[in-house]
Image: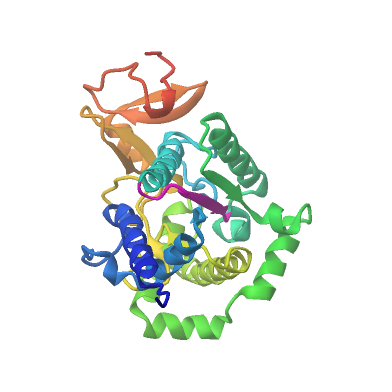
Amino acid sequence: MPMTTAPDTRATSHVSASILERLLPYHRTTGPAPATPDAFGHQLRRIAGFVREGEPVVFTLPGFPCKSPNPAKVLGHLPDQGERLSLRFLQSLCTDIERIYPPGARVVICSDGHVFGDLIRVPDHHIDAYADELRALIRESDLDRLSVFDLRDVLGDLPHDVKRAEVHHRHAPSLDALRAEVRDDAPTLALYRGITRFLVEDTADFTGTRSALQRECRRRAYGVIQRSRAWGALIAGRHPSAVRLSIHPQPAGAPKFGIRLLDAPDVWATPWHSAALREPDGRWTLLPRARAERLGRLVHREGRPSHFERPGVVSGLCYPGGDREVTGC
């Protein structure tokens, strides 16, 4: 009787779709979210490649760069409860996938702070401290499905400006090509506007006029996108088969899958541009520090500001994974 691979193909398709279904509730998009995996052909094909080989599904996530330099938005320059919750979410996503696909999944966090630290006006030693603390959080919390990858893994101990220039030279699109794309492509225009807004909000010490700040941030936004594209190309070269995630909103059918790490009223909010606020019912949301401060009290962990809590939250509750507030359980 002739052999056929059809059953294996159907099984691979079914498992791949089931894995993608675990991501769909967290899809970050600016439009209506499709309800089925069929709209995500890029991701299904990548996942299927791992499933056919019986290997863990590898996701790459550029992000977790550093904290915003604006003290009205964040609690400091080191990771806090927003990052802790986001890391646990990514770990739980991997373990959830493992329940339906025993080889499981892992996430490579591609920390991109050094790639554009000069453009977002964050000192390199703050970026190093942030990435080092991120690794420590992963290690101390036994988040064994997660790892961190940054420019130090690519170009070692070269000066940061040299590393940035090298990555830009090798991989960044030309400014003319990017300007044309912003003019002609709606998602790229939305990204450009979103990054410009973040740069304006993150600039706390500008002494010129508002219009001058807008012009400067529009110029820097092009540079941030160029460097982000360069970093993405470098990651793709290092992890050519990986499923590409993004913390930016992405339409269905895009090569990247936009993923929401935590709830937030702003679709562009991230833990590194915000502070975490805990609601009385246990839910968490991300808000600018100045707003969260008006809504709740500040909680410290291990001597550092961690998050805010609204009135009515019962202090001393255990966090998932065994973590506790400084007040204990």
Is 171 positioned to the left or the right of 254 in the image? right
**Residue at 70%, 53% in the rendered image:** 153
Q: Quadrant of residue 290?
A: top left
Q: Is residue 299 above or below residue 255?
A: above
Q: Position of residue 268 (x, y in %)?
A: 35, 56
Quadrant position of the N terminus in the picture: bottom left
Tell me, yes or no, whether the highlighted magenta stretch contains residue 70: no
**Residue at 54%, 47% in the rendered image:** 66
Q: Position of residue 50 (x, y in %)?
A: 49, 61
Observer able to see residue 254: no
**Residue at 21%, 66% in the rendered image:** 32
Q: How many marks?
A: 0
Quadrant position of the C terminus in the picture: top left
Outermost residue toward the right in this view: 158
Q: Nearer the viewer, residue 96 or 194?
A: 96
Q: Quadrant of residue 291?
A: top left
Q: Which residues are magenta?
A: 100-112
Observer able to see residue 50: yes
**Residue at 52%, 21% in the rendered image:** 303
Tell me, yes or no, whether the highlighted magenta stretch contains residue 108: yes
Q: Position of residue 60 (x, y in %)?
A: 51, 58
Q: Nearer the viewer, residue 278 or 245?
A: 245
Q: Position of residue 179 (x, y in %)?
A: 48, 82
Outermost residue toward the top in this view: 328
Q: Is residue 237 above or below residue 107?
A: below
Is 169 positioned to the left or the right of 207 in the image? right
Q: Quadrant of residue 246?
A: bottom left
